[in-house]
Image (cartoon, rainbow, N blue to C red):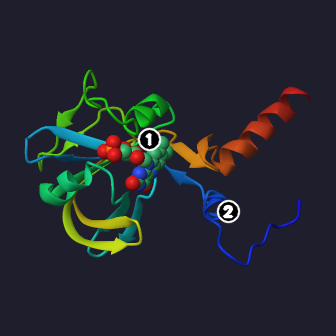
Amino acid sequence: MPLVQSATVDPKQFRKACGKFVTGVTIVTTRGADGAPHGMTANSFTSVSLDPPLVLFCAYRKIRLLEHFLQGGYFGVNILSEHQQELSNRFAKAGINRFAGVEWYEGKTGVPLLPGVLATLECRLDQTSEAGDHQILIGEAQYLGFREGTPLAYFGGGYSEVIPADARSRLHRDVFIEFL
Ligand SMILES: Cc1cc2nc3c(=O)[nH]c(=O)nc-3n(C[C@H](O)[C@H](O)[C@H](O)COP(=O)(O)O)c2cc1C
C-alpha cells in the first residue's frame, strides 16, 4: 500500500498517522482535594529524563479530573499488563465512580495505586505546560515498583499485543522443531 501523504493536516489523518506509534497503556491517578482517589486512562505517558528521573503525560484540558491532578501535587502511574483491558476501558469512561469496586492501595506519597499492574511510579508534580488543547504534566519519580510480565499495548486506535522479538523467533524455532 502506498504511503498516504497530506499537505494540510486534517485532524483525522493526524490521529491515524500518530496512531502508527505503538504505546503502552497507563492509568494515571491522584488524590483530590476531597481525599478521594481519581484516575484516568492515558497512553500519552513517556519517560523524559534519567537525571532527574522525569516522566510526563498529556491530559485533554477539558477533562474534569485535570483540576485534581494540578492540585494534588503528586500523581501515580500504573502501567497496565495485557490482562487489564477492562480496567483501561473503565478508567476512560465518563459518569461513573471509576474506583467503585476496584481494588487499590495507597502509595507512599498518598496516590492511589493498582495491584497487578506491570509497574507503578509515584511522581511529584514538577511542572506543567499548556500545549494546544492538552496540558503536559511532568513529574519527578519518587518511588517505583515493577514486575515481569507482558504489557497492554495500544496501536492504530485499538488494543494490541506485544510479542518480544526473541520470543517470536523462539516460537518459530519451537514449531519448526516440532515438525522435524
Ligand atoms: C487507551 C486510552 C488512552 C487514553 N489516553 C489519554 C491521554 O493520554 N490523555 C487524555 O487526556 N485522555 C486519554 N484518554 C481518554 C481519557 O481516559 C478520558 O477522556 C478521560 O478519562 C475522561 O475523563 P473525564 O470523565 O474526567 O472528562 C485515553 C483513553 C483510552 C481508552
Q: Residue at x 8, y 41 (%)?
A: 35
Give the number of the disc on residue 53: none
Residue 108 visible to the viewer = yes
Asked if 33 appears above or below 44 in the picture, the reply is above
Q: Say whether residue 86 is left or right of residue 36.
A: right
Asked if 179 appears above or below 106 in the picture, the reply is above
Q: Are discs 2 and 1 less than 8 Å apart at CB? A: no
Q: Residue at x 38, y 58 (%)?
A: 60
Q: Say whether residue 79 is left or right of residue 6.
A: left
Identify the amino acid type marked 2: Gln
- Circle 1 is placed at which residue position? 148
Q: Where's residue 26, x and y in %?
A: 40, 47
Q: Residue at x 28, y 25 (%)?
A: 102
Give the number of the disc on residue 13: 2
Q: Bin the neighbour count of mark 1 within 10 Å (Cα to Cα): few under 14, some 14-19, many 20 and up.
A: few
Q: Say whether residue 83 is left or right of residue 129.
A: right
Q: Quadrant of the N terminus?
A: bottom right
- Chain-order first, disc 2 or disc 1: 2
Q: Where's residue 64, x and y in %?
A: 27, 48
Q: Where's residue 6, x and y in %?
A: 75, 73
Picture quadrant where residue 174 is located: top right
